[in-house]
Image: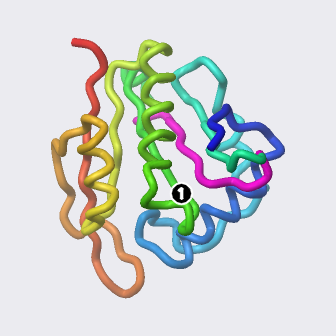
Amino acid sequence: MNIRPGESRDHGAIITLYNHYVRHSAATFDVEPVTARERQSWFAQFSADGPWQLLIAEDASQTELLGFACSTPLRPRAAYRRSVETTIYMAPDAAGRGRGTRLYGALLDALSAADVHRAYGVVTVPNPPSIALHEKLGFREVGRLSECGWKFERWWDVAFCEYRFGS
C-alpha cells in the first residue's frame, strides 16, 4: 500500500468511494450522493503541509484507491484553527487488514508536524470497527450526541473522539 497526499486526479475516485457510504451507511449524514461540482470547495481546502490535509491510500501498483483520510476545520472561527476534525473512509474490500490504521496514523503524523493541537473523530454509533480504530490510535471518547442524525428511517447517535498531540 502506498500513502501520499491527495491530488486532483484522485477526486473522482474519492467521490465514488464517499458516495458508496452515502448510499449504504450511516457513517456520513449526507443523504444524497455528492457531485464533483459540489465538492470543489471541499477539495480546495487541503494543502500538503497545513492543518487541513488529504491523504490517499492506493494499492502497490498505484492504480486503485483503497481509502482516504483527511482533516478539516473543526469550526469556522479563528480560535479553532489548531483543532481539526478527522475522517477516514476505506474501500469496503480494503477494510480489516490494518490499512486504515496505517492511513489514519499517517494523517496523525502529518498533523503533528503541522502544529495541530487536537484532532476530533466524529463517529456515528453504533460502529464498533470505527470506535476500535480510533481507540487503537489513541483517541478517547469525550462526548456523545444522542439521536442527532436521521438517516435510513432511524435516529443515530454521534460520538466525539479526541486525539491529543503533545502535552
Quadrant that contains the C terminus: top left
Whether residue 38 is visible, yes or no, is no
- Left of 161 or right of it: where is 36? right
- Left of 114 or right of it: where is 32? right
Residue drawn at x 55%, y 70% as measured from the top left: 22
The answer to whether residue 69 is magenta is yes
> Which segment did they paint magenta?
62-74
Q: Position of residue 69 (x, y in %)?
A: 53, 43
Whether residue 90 is visible, yes or no, is yes
**Main secondary structure of the magenta stretch:** strand
The answer to whether residue 91 is magenta is no
Q: Tell me: residue 120, above or below residue 80.
A: below
Q: Position of residue 128 (x, y in %)?
A: 26, 63
Q: Tell me: residue 131, above or below residue 34.
A: above
> Which one is in front, 144 or 128?
128
Q: Where is residue 39 in the image (x, y as percent from the top left)?
A: 70, 52
Q: Are there few (<14), some (14-19), or many (20+) residues within 10 Å of tag 1?
A: many
Q: What element carries label 1?
A: strand
Residue drawn at x 68%, y 50% as measured from the top left: 59
- Left of 16 or right of it: where is 30? left
- Left of 98 or right of it: where is 1? right
Image-quadrant location for residue 96: bottom left
Residue drawn at x 61%, y 18% as measured from the top left: 49
Q: What residue type is labelled 1?
A: Met
> Which one is in front, 38 or 157?
157
Quadrant that contains the N terminus: top right
Q: Position of residue 3 (x, y in %)?
A: 62, 36
Residue drawn at x 49%, y 32% as measured from the top left: 107
Report the residue marked by disc 1.
90
